[in-house]
Image (cartoon, rainbow, N blue to C red):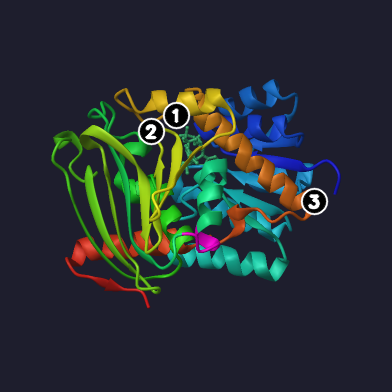
């Protein structure tokens, strides 16, 4: 395969970013579609390509190698199934889907068609995070004992609670909408056997269903215990993962844009998460301000834009150079655990996944 032909479904905030990332990486954007046809037209014009009325028309007219899906969280499944049925590879934005059986259906179809499913877990491909994964795989920490992940920040009450990003029925809730750290725990530490979760809303009374404090207690098949604490009711921002083992500890701090390895012999090594100073700086700056969800016409900040470009490079290398992208590994795990956590919250009990 020489030049990769890609088609885009969903031309909103992140669809635009993905179009740019694939374009910069040398892929050929052959066409786009969106239920908001004006948005599709605007993006098509920017890349001198065409907008199509729906997914089948897009694929039949452009015969892409890869279909990129950046629609609302609850609307990933239908275009993915259509694209696979037309024998295309698919790149699906996170969260993969809101129901584990939808992920399974997509994976089963992809397997039967011998096609790749890439999930947009873009934090995995940051250079510093890849290095952390390598340290874990190389057993540098020894037997891992315990891990802790956080995504704690403040987001002001939303004026428009009907906006899909504020509607828990459409996003799946924050655990799905911000699934990155749960995914990293699964990717780093393997199979989870049980989850206990609790959540509440303390600071956003205008949208009570959308919980702003979420806490998970996780047990892994390996015996590792972990916790994840996330939400938007935390005035003091914290965003990272720490993993402790018998021989040392790894700390990924997204607000410092660093990964630090401290060993029990007292040695310490620190790495930046990006290979470019400007992207590290942009991520560091992002921790300072009150955050908000990105609106349809917003531009991605530099750190997010670079993260998207890096993940897209791995997708292109996978499809053109047989270099396996980590975006194909353990695609469903985070959704399975997030779904179990939701059940745990509803039933107020620990859920076994074994
Ligand atoms: N990886 C990341 O860090 C990251 C960042 C932002 C968004 N996302 C994910 O990207 C996806 C899109 O988010 P966004 O911020 O771009 O939202 P958005 O609302 O800005 O854009 C979504 C677009 O999809 C279109 N759309 C919805 N359903 C459709 C369908 N069935 N067919 C065609 N078009 C459809 C909408 O009209 C809209 O233009 C979400 O799943 C979100 O979680 C991931």
The residue that disc 1 covers is 283
**Marks 3/2: CA distance?**
33 Å
Number of marks in picture: 3
Dot 3, how many residues are within 10 Å of its Cα: few (below 14), some (14-19), or many (20+)?
few
| Residue at point 68%, 35% (across, down) | 22
Between label 1 and label 3, give the one nearer the viewer. 1
User: Does residue 41 appear in the picture of this structure?
Assistant: yes
Is residue 244 placed above or below 232 in the rendered structure? below
Taking 25 as reference, is 223 left or right?
left
Taking 317 as reference, is 38 left or right?
left
Q: Secondary structure at mark 1?
A: helix
127 or 90: nearer the eye? 127
Q: Secondary structure at mark 3?
A: helix
* Quarter occupied by residue 26: top right
The residue that disc 2 covers is 255
Residue range in magenta is 136-140
Dot 2, how many residues are within 10 Å of its Cα: few (below 14), some (14-19), or many (20+)?
some
Residue 285: x, y in percent? 40, 23
């Amino acid at each position: 395969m020489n030049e990769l032909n890609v088609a885009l479904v969903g031309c909103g905030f992140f669809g635009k970013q993905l179009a740019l990332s694939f374009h910069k990486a040398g892929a050929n954007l052959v066409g786009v579609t969106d239920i908001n046809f004006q948005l599709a037209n605007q993006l098509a014009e920017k890349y001198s390509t065409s907008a199509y009325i729906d997914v089948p028309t897009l694929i039949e007219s452009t015969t892409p190698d890869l279909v990129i899906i950046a629609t609302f969280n609850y609307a990933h499944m239908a275009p993915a199934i259509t694209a696979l049925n037309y024998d295309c590879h698919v790149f699906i934005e996170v969260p993969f889907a809101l129901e584990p059986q939808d992920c399974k259906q997509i994976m089963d179809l992809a397997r039967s068609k011998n096609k790749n499913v890439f999930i947009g877990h873009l934090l995995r491909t940051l250079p510093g995070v890849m290095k952390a994964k390598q340290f874990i795989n190389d057993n540098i920490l020894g037997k891992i004992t315990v891990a802790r992940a956080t995504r704690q920040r403040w987001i002001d009450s939303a004026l428009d609670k009907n906006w899909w990003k504020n509607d828990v029925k459409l996003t799946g809730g924050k655990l799905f909408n911000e699934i990155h750290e749960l995914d990293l725990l699964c990717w780093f530490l393997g199979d989870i056997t049980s989850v206990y979760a609790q959540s509440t809303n303390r600071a956003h009374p205008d949208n009570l269903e959308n919980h702003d404090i979420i806490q998970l207690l996780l047990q892994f098949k390996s015996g590792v215990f972990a916790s994840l604490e996330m939400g938007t009711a935390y005035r003091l921002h914290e965003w990272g993962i720490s993993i402790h083992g018998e021989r040392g500890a790894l700390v990924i701090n997204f607000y410092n844009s660093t990964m630090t390895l401290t060993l029990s012999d007292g040695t310490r090594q620190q790495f930046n998460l990006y290979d470019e100073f400007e992207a590290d700086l942009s991520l560091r700056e992002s921790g300072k301000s009150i955050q908000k969800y990105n609106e349809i016409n917003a531009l991605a900040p530099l750190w997010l834009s670079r993260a998207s470009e890096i993940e897209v490079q791995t997708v292109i290398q996978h499809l053109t150079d047989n270099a396996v992208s980590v975006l194909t590994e353990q695609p469903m795990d985070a959704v399975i655990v997030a779904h179990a956590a939701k059940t745990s919250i509803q039933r107020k009990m620990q859920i076994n996944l074994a």
